[in-house]
Image (cartoon, grey):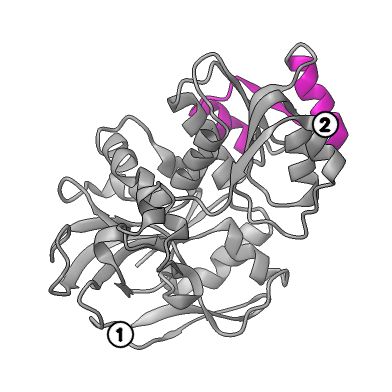
Amino acid sequence: MRGVIMYGPGDVRVEDREDPAIVEATDAVIRITATCICGSDLWPYRGADRVDRAKMGHEYVGVVEEVGPEVRTVKPGDFVVGSFVISDGTCEICRAGFPSSCVHRVFVDGAIGTQAQRARIPFADGTLVATPGQPDPDLVPHLLAASDVLGTGWFAAVAAQAGPGRTVAVVGDGAVGLMGVLAARQLGAERVIAMSRHAGRQELARHFGATDVVEERGDAGVARIKELTGGLGAHSVIEAVGSQESMTQAIGATRPGGNVGFVGVSHDVRLPGQLLFFSQVQILGGPAPVRRFLPDLVQRIWDRTIDPGKVFDLTLPLEQAAEGYRAMDERRATKVLLTV
C-alpha cells in the first residue's frame, strides 16, 4: 500500500508500505476512505519536533475490511470513524472519561500512520465508532473532522466549561480553534469571541457561531477581551495553539473563577507560579479524549446538525501529500483533506 513518510523537517514522501494485517484478537483492519493533515503535523515538518522516517497521519475514516475474533462493536463493511489515540475502552482511566490516557494508549501518528491506504487499528472496540449506515459522499469530510479536530475543539470547550450564559474566547484560529468556536456554540455559549487576524478564518469562525472577532494578540489581545467583557475577562477560554504567548494570553483573558481548556500541543510553555496563583483560574487540557465524544459527534453530523468539514479548504490526492504540507505550512490552507 501507499503511505506518507516524513524523513525529516520539510521532507515528506509517499512511499510503498507493508499492508496491515490482524495481529491481535482485538484488531481491525480498515481501508481508509479519507485522511488529512493536522496542524500538529507541522511541528515536526518545521523542525520543532525530531522525526526520522515517521509514519504520518492520525485522522481517518474508512471501511472495516477484517476484524479479530474478539471485536464486537464493528464488523466488515462498516464505515467507521476512529480516534487519533488507540484506547481499550475498558481500563479505569477510559471509564473515567479520559481514553486518550488509556493504560494501553498508542498514538496513531508515528506508530500506525493513517495518511495511508489502509491501517491496522488495535483495540477496535475502544477506538472506532461505526456510523449508522454508509454515509453520503458529502458527509465524509464532516465525519473525518470528528476523528481529531472536532473532538479536540469539543474537549477544549467542555474543559473550559462553555455553556449557557457564558462568554467564551478562543485563542488560535487554526482548525482546532475553529472547531472550538463551533463546540462552544453547540454547548450553548451566549457569546463566542474568536481571536484571528486572517479574513478567511474570521469568516469561517462566524459561520461556526462566533459573535465577535478580536485581531489583537498578546497583552493587547487580553486588554481587548477584557474591554469586551466589562473589564472582567471571559468565563471560558480555549487555548488551541500550544505556544508560550498563546497560553499566557489564554490565562490572562480568563476572569477569576473562570476556566481554561488547553489543547494546543505544548512547545516550550512555562507558566510562572505567580501568574497561576493570582489568576485564580481552573485549567484542564492535554490530548483530547476524542473517543469519549465520538458517538455524540457522529450522530450530530449524521443528522446534519453541524458541518465541521467546512474547515477543509484544500483537497488533494494522497500522492500529493507533500504539497498539502507546504500549503498548510505557508498558511495557504487551513486544513488539507487527502483522498485515498
Residue 284 makes an appearance in the image: yes
**For the residue carrying disc 1, how many other residues have a C-alpha within 10 Å: few (<14), some (14-19), or many (20+)?**
few
Characterize the magenta stretch by its predominant secondary structure: helix
Q: Quadrant of residue 268?
A: bottom right
- Which stretch did the figure color magenta? 200-228
Q: Which mark is residue 278?
A: 2
Residue 149 in the magenta stretch? The answer is no
Cα distance, mark 2 to mark 1?
54 Å
Q: Residue visible at 56% across and 85% down? A: 53
Q: Tell me where residue 254 appears, x and y as whole percent.
A: 72, 28
- In this rendering, is residue 266 above or below 318? above
Residue 216 in the magenta stretch? The answer is yes
Q: Quadrant of residue 172?
A: top right
Q: Amino acid at mark 2?
A: Phe
Q: Which residue is mark 1?
A: 19
- In this rendering, is residue 87 above or below 25? above
